[in-house]
Image (cartoon, helix red, strand yellow):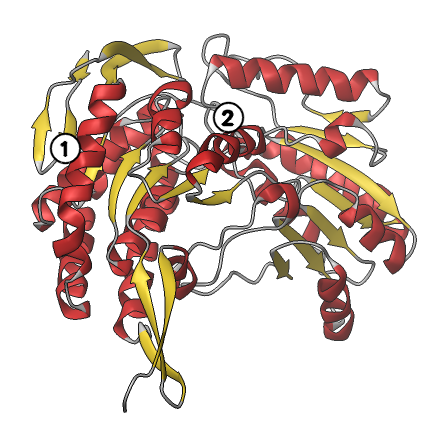
Amino acid sequence: MLEKRKFYINGEWVDPVEGRDLEVIDPSNEEPFAIISLGGQADTDAAVAAAKTALPAWAATTREERLALLEKLLQAYKARSEDLAQAMSREMGAPIDWARSAQVGAGSWHLQGFIEALKDFTFEYEYAPGEHHIREPIGVAGLITPWNWPMNQVTLKVGAAVAAGCTMVLKPSEVAPLSSLVFAEAMEEAGFPAGVFNLVNGDGPGVGTQLSTHRDVDMISFTGSTRAGIQISRAAAPTMKRVACELGGKGANIIFEDAPEKAVKIGAIKCFNNSGQSCNAPTRMLVHRSRYEEAVEQAAAQAEATSVGPALAEGRHIGPVVSEAQFHKIQDLIQKGIDEGARLVAGGPGRPKGLNRGYYVRPTVFADVSNDMTIAQTEIFGPVLSIIPFETEEEAIAIANDTEYGLTNYVQSSDPERCKRVARQLKSGMVEMNYKSFAQGSPFGGVRMSGLAREGGKFGIEEFLVLKAVSGWEA
């Protein structure tokens, strides 16, 4: 049993003042394999005080000083790649090959993106004759990150805060905390000044709320469920701190009659990747009626061909979902789809054959889904695909926009003009056309109940800055 009870505060690994133990569960076998501490108010206060004390000197550092430390962090991060992959595989069930490539790779990708963005980022400029504008660090930032893409989200927040000149307190998910402890060691190895980066483990009602309500915290950057984002925003309101939320999604993948042959298969793979635990997953597949039955067969075949197994097993497969609570939530929603009359064409309730322990979910496909069904409106956060037919372009757009979310939508067509026309009408922060990946530093974020934050590159840095206008500035 690993014992990881310490927090990283003011450049030192310290014992909790008010800690209580929490077992970390391996979702592949439902067995505890590590123990962490959940902090209390005294621990949060100590971390915030360290960040506040370090802020003046850190905010005054030059671009070159921050770049040098970000470069060192990137190297330290890469040196710990295997430790990070092993931690994420055990704590949240990512297959080890996927953890090494996608999960760890996302972190180094974002850190490199911040390095490139910072090199020519404009912190000061002349707005008008005699008027100067200055972008300054907002101050102490509370960073609250999720379990589904641990290093993706930690690096998106820490990298941006570092580049902006903010100090910070990180509260990673208590469900998947071990990779963040490795990351904290990389921050220490990179040589950041004491107090710039602090880590306190805790849960949402505890450390999460304490950071959200703390008067010495100037900003909260949160990634997680819409429900939790609303609670954090309410908690933060009395102190008028900035709250940047990146929340849930229910992406529509519109497949027109002229989409490439592999469009359905790729869409299903994207839905099932990471065991469906991605906020930008294309979980609603909207298919033109002329290709509908063929698409249903293709998606069902892909579900049946998707292997499920333990996280530490080598090879291409999906692992378990992260926890017992998530497993039962997904099972309930699969049953809800059956009860509401959707046609189950692959998967279904229960674990895959041969797996009777661990939080494994069968890759599941529903056809004949109407957009008012629960499975079409609820973020399931599991490997569950809902297929909906449409007749016209206008109907497809209407169905895609008929959701409270607005993170990522997808469009598949061989007609570039139609792709552009549809993309302009979709209500989402991102539209991925013909599965073309976004560039490094592209703004990640949504609208409506998916939140309003923008993370990554120069857009992520801007989230951690405030704009000061100064008049009477002589040239």
Residue 23 visible in this rendered orientation of the protein: yes
The residue that appears at 71% across and 47% down in the rendered structure is: 252
Quadrant containing the N terminus in the rendered view = top left
Report the amino acid beneath label 2. Val
| Residue 301 drawn at (x, y percent) | 69, 36
* In the rendered image, the vertical position of residue 248 relative to residue 419, given as above or below: above
Is residue 179 found left or right of 233 in the rendered image? left
Check disc 2 and report the residue beneath it. 308
- Residue at image position (45%, 22%) is 322
Q: Residue at x 38, y 36 (%)?
A: 145
Residue 396 at what x, y percent from top left?
83, 52
Residue at x-position 60% and y-position 33%: 305
Q: Please state which of residues 134 and 470 is positioned toward the viewer in this rendering.
A: 470
In this rendering, does residue 108 appear at all?
A: no
Q: Nearer the viewer, residue 108 or 228?
A: 228
Q: Would you name the residue on which mark 1 appears?
A: 9
Give the mark nearer the N terminus: 1 vs 2. Answer: 1
Please say if 251 is above or below 460.
Answer: above
How many numbered badges does the structure rendering display? 2
Give the SS element for disc 1.
strand
Residue 12 place in picture, x, y as percent? 7, 33
